[in-house]
Amino acid sequence: MSEPQSAQQTPDGAQHRMRPARLLFEPEAAASDPEHFFDLESIEDPGRLLDRSTELTIAFRAAADRATEFQAMAAAQLADPGRFDRVSIAAIAERAEWSEDYAKRMVEFGLELLNEQPPPE
């Protein structure tokens, strides 16, 4: 895993401070205050701030991993040759903004996940 960086060098050699990326769907309070992020800005104790921001980082990673699994399963279902409305790998790639190679790998991963699931009762 790479280490986080607090500054990034631009092509002209200048450095600028990196800001945390905004979520696409942040809590409502974030919309009214762009500096607001899960109340982290209000934590003054650096130890507590590290603990809470680490918890959020782990939670976001787990959520991203789980969302990726759902993407893969959906891609596999859309590409299923048994469906009358089957979608091509190229169409899946375009819809998900992936390369065709990545879409193909996601379909394969999704098939693996779907084959591991127990049948519905």
Image (cartoon, rainbow, N blue to C red):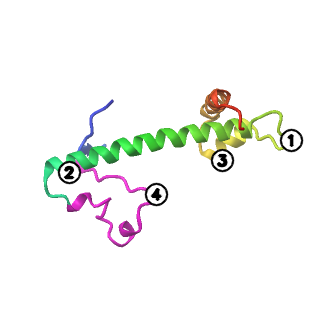
The magenta-colored residue range is 14-42
**Residue that badge 2 annotates:** 49
| 3 and 4 marks in contact (CB < 8 Å) | no
**Residue that badge 1 annotates:** 84
| 2 and 4 marks in contact (CB < 8 Å) | no
Residue 95 tag number: 3
Instruction: Name the quarter where the N terminus is drawn.
Output: top left
Q: Is residue 46 left or right of residue 94?
A: left
Identified by mark 2, the residue type is Leu
Query: Would you say the magenta stretch is mainly helix, strand or loop?
Result: loop
Q: Earlier in the sequence, mark 3 or mark 4?
A: 4
Helix, strand or loop for disc 4: loop
Q: Earlier in the sequence, mark 1 or mark 4?
A: 4
Instruction: Name the quarter where the C terminus is drawn.
Output: top right
Crowd band around label 2 with a 10 angstrom C-alpha radius: few (<14), some (14–19), many (20+): some
Q: Nearer the viewer, residue 31 or 17?
A: 31
The percent coordinates of residue 80 (x first, y second) are 77, 34
Q: Is residue 91 visible?
A: yes
